[in-house]
Image (cartoon, grey):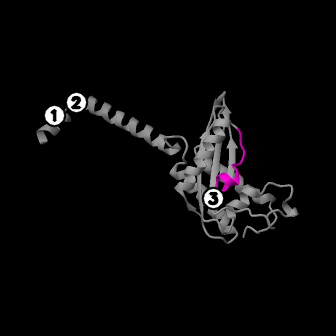
Amino acid sequence: MFDQFRVFFNPTNKMKFIRMLTLLFLIFSINCSKDSISIDGYFLSEEDVALSIKVHNDARAEVGVSNLKWSNSLSEDALEWAKNLAEKDEMYHSSNESRPGQGENLSVAWKTVGGESVFSSTPGLDASNSWYYEINDYTYAEIGSDLNANVMIGHYTQMIWSTTTEVGMARAVSSSGKEYVVARYSPPGNWVGLFPY
């Protein structure tokens, strides 16, 4: 065994060894960078999931409601709708009938640099933050109240809805370079006439 070790590490094989290590490092680096934005380009990275859930749960803690848990099943449903939006390159909510027992938040973003599309490494976090910022326009009231008649607050109220326990998110990119993020919630919130918490 030691003779094989000496043969492999003798000076004439040193360059081969360095090349092999370099190649392995490059393969490992490429695989890691693909994982960070998800290999299939649809599901959020582990880091993005953690950051997205943190935004949701920090918002919920502010109003005294329990934390959400991540749901892979809801993520798969979110992916199906995100792909639909990207294919049509148009943002609109799915019908309530098509997603029984689920609430839904949507986001679309795009950015180009030098004519090339540039995508966020944390699309879930970006979407979650944009939904959270609706707090600035929200006046505590039941859903449908005139107090919030002319402002967009439904993404925020879904995030903090007291009886919602799970969330799942996914993303899809259109041919024009728009990045669609869909979140699905269970049970759904935003019931007209009810307070979010």
Question: Which of pointers 3 and 1 lies earlier in the amino acid sequence?
Answer: 1
Circle 2 residue: 13
Inspect the image, locate mark 1, and give the three-letter code of the amino acid beneath it.
Val
Residue name at image x 40 percent, y 35 percent: 26
Q: Quadrant of residue 191?
A: bottom right
Is the residue under label 1 in contact with that under label 3 (CB below 8 Å)? no
Which disc, if any, is residue 185? Answer: 3
Inspect the image, locate mark 2, and give the three-letter code of the amino acid beneath it.
Asn
Q: Nearer the viewer, residue 170 or 125?
A: 170
Spatial CA span between label 2 and label 3? 57 Å
Classed neighbour count for the residue bearing mark 2: other residues with Cα under 10 Å, few (<14), some (14–19), many (≥20)? few
> Where is residue 18 shown, x and y percent of the image?
30, 33
Whether the magenta-drawn stretch holds residue 103 is answered as: yes
Q: What residue span does the magenta drawing correspond to?
A: 90-104
Residue name at image x 67 percent, y 72 percent: 64
Left or right? Give the position of 65 relative to 121.
right
> Where is residue 112 shown, x and y percent of the image?
67, 33
Camera-near label (3 vs 1) is 3
Q: Nearer the viewer, residue 43 or 23?
A: 43
Q: Nearer the viewer, residue 92 or 46?
A: 92
Classed neighbour count for the residue bearing mark 1: other residues with Cα under 10 Å, few (<14), some (14–19), many (≥20)? few
> Where is residue 90 shown, x and y percent of the image?
71, 39
Q: Quadrant of residue 92?
A: top right
Question: Which of pointers 1 and 2 lies earlier in the amino acid sequence?
Answer: 1
Circle 1 residue: 7
Is the residue under label 2 in contact with that under label 1 (CB below 8 Å)? yes
